[in-house]
Amino acid sequence: MQNGYLNEPTVVHVRLYGEERQITVEPGETILVAAIRASLDPPYSCVSGQCATCRAKLLSGAVTMDNNDVLTEEELAEGYILTCQAHPTTHGVTVDYDQ
């Protein structure tokens, strides 16, 4: 691991608009960037961790976020993440934009 991120590509399961897709997240890449690259059309706006438009619920695995200026401690405890700031730190990550 480098900077806490995986140093190899990993598959992330993404639930979005009622469908589940698998995307490959490259080392150092955020889940949002990988989802856009995979043409999933995820919701996003600021891409800096300040608006929560890209918020999703982490259902499995673990991530680290570069920045979080908007999610409360309660939301974090419930498993919500900002995908524009989230990097997988384990394999087996599943996120749900629909929750």
Image (spheres, rainbow, N blue to C red):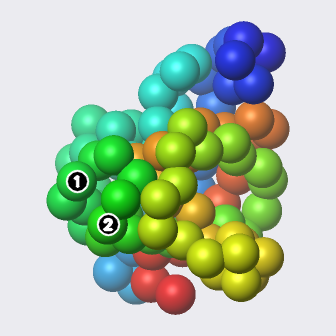
Which of the two residues, 37 or 57, is positioned nearer the viewer here?
A: 57
**Earlier residue among tags 1 and 2:** 1
Look at label 1 and name its amino acid: Cys
Residue in view at x 52 percent, y 55 percent:
68
Residue carrying label 1: 46
Vertical placement of residue 68 versus 34, above or below:
below
Whole-percent x, y for residue 86 in the image: 55, 45
Q: Is residue 23 visible?
A: no
Which of the two residues, 42 or 73, is positioned nearer the viewer here?
A: 73
Q: Which mark is residue 21?
A: none
Q: For the view shown, which residue lies furthest in the front direction? A: 69
Question: Dividing the picture into quarters, in which one does residue 1 lie?
Answer: top right
Residue carrying label 2: 51
Whole-percent x, y for residue 51 in the image: 32, 66
Distance, label 1 to label 2, CA atoms, is 6 Å
Total residue callouts? 2
Residue in view at x 77 percent, y 62 percent:
60
Dot 2 falls on a residue whose secondary structure is loop
Residue in view at x 34 percent, y 38 percent:
33
